[in-house]
Amino acid sequence: METLLTRTEAAKRLKITTATLDELRRGGYITYIQYKENGKVYFTETALQEYLDKHTKKAKPTQSLLTYRRRRSGF
């Protein structure tokens, strides 16, 4: 069984506030465990990693154009 993280621990690992974490949870962006209705909420390392993998964007290489003008042919 995985270690369960509290809201505070999960927020620290993601480097966000607990309020932001709660919004992500309510919006269905991150999975969580809650044993009783209106009880404490816990997160797993796997859930945090899945969230990061799903919402991480790869950087695109930039085009190194010195100007936006098109080059003239014939020079």
Image (cartoon, grey):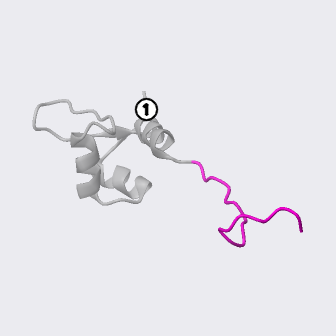
Query: Which of the two residues, 43 or 50, is positioned nearer the viewer here?
Result: 50
Quadrant the N terminus occupies: top left
Q: Is residue 56 above or below residue 65?
A: above
Q: Quadrant of residue 42?
A: top left
* Residue 2 placement (x, y as % from top left): 43, 32
Q: Which residue is mark 1?
A: 2
Residue 57 placed where, x, y %?
53, 48
View extreme (bottom): residue = 66
- Quadrant where the C terminus sits is bottom right
Q: Residue at x 23, y 49 (%)?
A: 23
Amino acid on which the number 1 mark rests in the picture: Glu
Which of the 4 quarters of the picture holds residue 27? top left
Q: Most extreme residue toward the right, as rendered? A: 75
The local secondary structure at tag 1 comes to loop
Q: Which residues are magenta?
A: 58-75
Nearer to me, 22 or 54? 54
Asked if 33 appears above or below 17 in the picture, the reply is above
Please name the residue shown 27% across and 55% down the image: 20
> Is residue 66 in the magenta section?
yes
Report which quarter residue 11 is drawn in.
bottom left
- Give 70 or 13, whichever is nearer the viewer: 70
Instruction: Look at 41% across and 59% down and name the residue there.
Output: 15
> Residue 71 in magenta?
yes
